[in-house]
Amino acid sequence: MREKDKICIMEVIEQTMADGPGLRTSIYCAGCYHKCPGCHNPQSWDMKNGHWVSVDDLLDLIKSDEFSNVSFSGGDPFYQVDAFTELARRIKEETNKTIWCWTGFTYEEILADEHLAQMLPWIDVLVDGPFILEQRDTTLLFRGSPNQRIIHLTPEEEDIIPGTVPLVRPR
Ligand code: SF4
């Protein structure tokens, strides 16, 4: 299998309501080098703690649930951007599901890196930026600190949740 054909994951949680609006199939990947102090999931930093699953198998699992949309979390999916882009592209081309994606990179950092930015066209909502322990706020929905933004990249997910910011499109 090529690198873009498989993803190192910690787990997949089906029909969760914790990772975005409504029911979602959440893919928690392994691998994160941001190493934010106070990270909710430090065991996900090391890819050795994960296991490899093919993009085909993940897509089959996602498609088997008629009602759930999809979330990518971790870990940081952008450290496996080739394979997650392949999965996201196929989800958007073969289903009508929406995709939320969490990352420790900022939106601006992703835009400035052509390799990372390849996934953006297939994502509906990006929750960006590192977790900042000193700013932790447990009242926030879907994010741990207020620097993290809920950025709608498409109009498909219409829920406007506190933390949603207007999208500044790149020039
Ligand atoms: S980006 Fe997320 S998974 Fe990675 S260290 Fe920060 S809080 Fe943890």
Image (cartoon, helix red, strand yellow):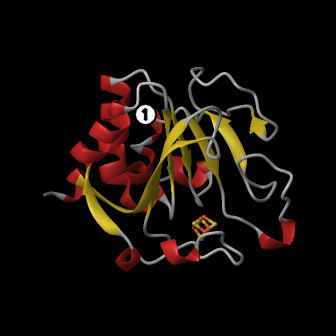
Up the image or down, 157 lies above or below 4; here it is: above
Report helix, strand or loop for mark 1: helix
Q: Position of residue 121 (x, y in %)?
A: 44, 33
Where residue 111 appears, x then y in whole percent?
52, 46
Residue at figure coordinates x 72%, y 52% from the top left:
143
* Residue bearing the label numbered 1: 122
Circle count: 1
Residue sitting at 60 percent across and 20 percent down? 155
Asked if ligand 1 lies within 8 A of label 1, the reply is no
Task: Out of 157 and 14, give the one closest to the viewer.
Answer: 14
Q: Residue at x 51, y 61 (%)?
A: 74
* Residue 166 x %, y %: 74, 31
Is residue 71 positioned above or below 69 on the image?
below
Tag 1: Cα neighbours inside 10 Å, few (<14), some, or many (≥20)?
many
Name the residue: 27% across, 57% down. Answer: 53
Q: Quadrant of ligand 1?
A: bottom right
